[in-house]
Image (cartoon, rainbow, N blue to C red):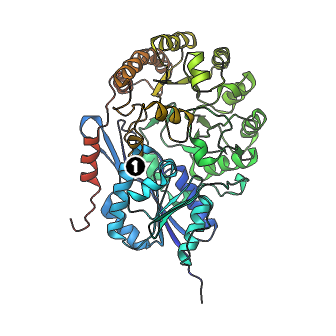
Amino acid sequence: MKKKIGKIAFLDSPYILTEPFFQHMPPLSLLYLTAYAEKCGFEAQIYPLNISVKERRGLYYFGFDTRLLIKDLKNFMPDMIAVSCPYSGRWPFTRRFISFLRSYFPDTPIAIGGIHPTTFPEYCLTNSEANYVVIGEGEITMVELAKHILADKSPYSLDGIAFFDNGKFIFNPKTKFIKDLDNLPFPAYHHIDIEKYKGICKKDRISQLKGLYFSLLTSRSCPFQCTYCNMHIAHGKQWRARSPENVVSEISYLVNKYKVNQFAIVDDNFTLSKRRTIDILKLILKTNSIPAIKFITPNGLSAKTLDEEVIFYLKKAGALEIAIAVESGSDYIRNVIYNKRLSTEKVLEVVAGCKKYHLPCKAFFMVGAPEESEETINQTIDLIKKIKIPAYFNITTPYKGTALYDYYIKKGLINEEDLRQGRAMDLRLPVEESKDYAKIIQWRRKLQIFNIIYAWKDIITSSRWITVNNFKRLITTSLFPTQITQKDIDEVLKKYIPVNKNK
């Protein structure tokens, strides 16, 4: 008797944003999961979001043509459906989307993954129609779960899984991580209509990149222990890196197969190892099968890991710009509250190195930390005036699993229910109930003025950015950002994600 080949459908989750940028590609997590499932003998399909709609008040909905999606899923008839919820702000959409899928596939097991279900597995299972949560790094667990489902076996023994069994919550924490990342197949871009995405992204921009680009994940995790980061919940505390040869092999493959030479390196700590970083950059330069490429580091680089030599090779290998995570101009906020272990002198040194080698650089800051004050905000302004580069300001958000979160809970500064329900909708804005909300917004607006000053200087020196529309968006999103409310979410969910299939 021929063994049944299992089928897994991997789906992105809908969301809304205050920017009109269509997500240029399915999440890298789904592309990796799909590729790994195929490597293990499964038939897998990935279903990316395929519509974008401008809603009122400058909101944009990104989702599915639901009729086409259901038609395609019914033709595929998966043994398991896997849905990604990469950010807490997507949870209301993921939950509703799962209900929508359940109305058409009442008996098909549904698994969810991503940082939000990983952080709140019991809540997400209790408050949705999903059957399983895959905790953290998902390739191995997802495939093993699918194998258990095909064999009609309970997944009790699996590492990194959560589910209910006869009313009892079963939680197996993530303890095993992939040590040799070179053994993973490259992301499953062969499932994606690249030409279609080239058209979609023709007028799209992310920083200095214009049009379609590929994301590169060359390592996983970060050994640093910043108090605001919960990345270790997904990827563990040990930094694991792909070899330079494996990274450059992927670049060569993507450039030559798809004729796209733009990349975003999305590691949590790409430059942790100086030797490995330079080896990758040198190998890019000497590999004949790779023409000149362009890349950025949108997740930010650790300034502690940068020096003139690394900056020189970043620029020479094709970096259009880099981002560094500074977080605050106050040494106290940066190093005591956030545990960055980063001196102001090092920040100045890195920025000076970037200017020496003509490598555009931007800085990430956060606003609203515990003990933030007018004095610490003024210290941030002083640092911005010294470095004179574009600066972007997120609002400090205490994610579960972090020391900062424990502090906020202990002091009664947040209600965990807000975070469980995904009410911190826009990563640039906190939940309205947070302490000193109005003051934080005022501080952020004050700081954004300097972003406009130095970003505009950056814009006029780059032909890629000289448009009236770009400058208009810079002003409006910096000083008068659209706030996503619960009413907005409810209306979008009702309009675009029907849960009654008879309507």
Q: Is residue 206 visible?
A: no
- Name the residue located 64 percent from the left edge and 20 percent from the top edge: 354
- Name the residue located 69 percent from the left edge and 29 percent from the top edge: 316
Q: Is residue 440 above or below residue 215?
A: above
Please name the residue that numbered disc 1 is placed on: 91
What number of labels is visible? 1
Residue 194, image x and y in percent?
Answer: 49, 53
Horizontal relation, residue 154 to residue 249: left or right: left
Q: Badge 1: how crowded within 10 Å, few (<14), some, or many (20+)?
A: many
Q: Secondary structure at mark 1?
A: helix
User: Which quadrant of the figure has residue 5?
Assistant: bottom right
- Name the residue located 73 percent from the left edge and 53 percent from the top edge: 180
Horizontal relation, residue 338 to residue 316: left or right: left
Relative to the observer, which residue lies in front, 439 or 357? 439
Residue 449, image x and y in percent?
Answer: 41, 15
Q: Which image quarter is the N terminus in?
A: bottom right
User: Which quadrant of the figure has residue 344?
Assistant: top right
Residue 96, image x and y in percent?
Answer: 33, 56
Relative to the observer, which residue lies in front, 474 or 4? 4
Relative to the observer, which residue lies in front, 232 or 193? 232
Q: Residue furthest left?
A: 503
- Give the amino acid type for the residue marked by disc 1 in the picture: Trp
Q: Residue furthest bottom?
A: 1
Horizontal relation, residue 314 to residue 163: left or right: right
Relative to the observer, which residue lies in front, 163 or 452? 163
- Name the residue located 43 percent from the left edge and 43 percent from the top edge: 201
Horizontal relation, residue 404 to residue 452: left or right: right
Q: Which image quarter is the C terminus in?
A: bottom left
Q: Is residue 252 visible?
A: yes
